[in-house]
Amino acid sequence: GADGAFKYAVNGTWRASNSGSTCDALNPSKANARSSSFQACTTQEVDEVFAAARSAQRGWAKTPLHARAKLLHEAARLMRAHAEPMALALTNEVAKGAKDARVEVERSADLIEYTAEEGVRLLGEGKLLMSDSFPGNSRNKLCLASKVPVGVVLCIPPFNYPVNLCVSKIAPALIAGNTVVVKPPTQGCTATLHMMQCFIKAGFPPGTVNALTGRGGEIGDYLTTHPEVNAISFTGGETGIRVAQKAGMVALQTELGGKDACIVLPDADLDLAAKSIVKGGFSYSGQRCTAVKLVAVFEEVADELLSKVNAQIAQLSVGLPEDNANITAVVSKSSADFIESLVQDAKSKGAKLCQEWRREDNLIWPLL
């Protein structure tokens, strides 16, 4: 594509956009230097991708379950065989530690295989209903119910797990007979595209697996309100609220993060609690929807727990993801600014900081 940018996937092939424009993914660890570029697709190209997905879905829905499962297993095999480009992209574009990046790819392959096996069992079963289960009817009729695909599924994964939380959308959709259109996140786009290549190379029919890249501000609303979309699976932040407000009468699955609390009771194993709090709060620099955001502890054990937590935090390393530092750069300057504003706001309102931190670019270093 233009300037060596990654292409988008439609109908089993990779294409450059007619827009002649590209978007950049940055490297948070390298002062936001450009990591890679990808196509800025047009609305006309969005139409073409959805048309391909719609056309392919009819044949894919008739494909035997065992054949769908076989293709999913092949995609998983290819992911393991080509894990390094995905892991490297995760390190470069979302500052994920090299070891954790590799684990994300491997457990994503595991999830594909699990989905294939469970899908064959769940979708291969019908349900027999007797007519007298409904009031006013006698037991003289039988009804056989079975699951059918919804059609075309739009999958929008987030930056923090652009491989794993994409696989968790497309694998179940595919085994159920749906076709998918993926809109990768800007940060993490390269890893998602490498993963999509594994599905295409696995032999899925053209149009079954598609990837559209571009600026959310230009094609985001067009994607989520497209008439060919039958279901949307979205993981992310507040953007999901807008998706829900604008999407039509389609199946909608959103996961928008949370305010996960850790509650520590007086009889708790405080060493285990401290270890879990530090891992839950600082793993991937806290950029997880399941991260610990709040700790509620009984007063009689609070000081002891705090001492144990601080001792473990002091052992955390801060640095580059390729060095497998415990805490790496957060994904963007705006994220770093927001985190710092929360600390300063708490401090201004009387909160006592247990440890001071020093800001440097997107990194926040502990001063011990």
Image (tube, helix red, strand yellow):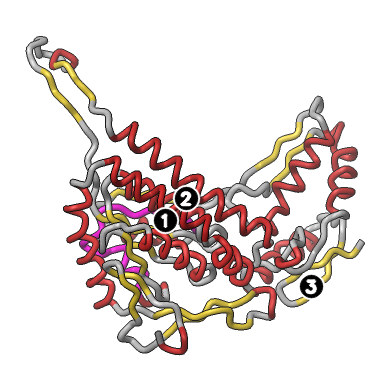
Looking at marks 3 and 1 on the same chain, the residue that comes earlier in the sequence is marked by 1
Disc 1 is placed on an element classified as strand
Q: Indicate which label's residue lies in the foreground, 3 or 1.
A: 1
Quarter of the figure that contains the N terminus: bottom left
Q: In which quadrant is the C terminus drawn?
A: bottom right
Residue 237 visible within the image = no
- On the image, numbered disc 3 is attached to which residue? 359
Residue drawn at x 23%, y 28% is 126
The percent position of residue 244, horizontal first and vertical second, equals: 36, 56
Q: Up-down: is 54 above or below 112? A: below
Compared with 141, 78 (above or below) is: below
Q: Which residue is denoted by mark 1 in the rendering?
A: 234
Q: Residue at x 34, y 32 (%)?
A: 121
Q: Badge 2 is on which residue? A: 255
The residue type indicated by label 3 comes to Arg
Tell me where residue 91 sits by quadrant: bottom right
CB-based contact (under 8 Å), mark 1 and mark 2:
yes
Q: Is residue 150 above or below residue 353?
A: above
Q: Give, as a three-letter code, the residue at label 2.
A: Glu
Which residues make up the magenta segment? 219-237
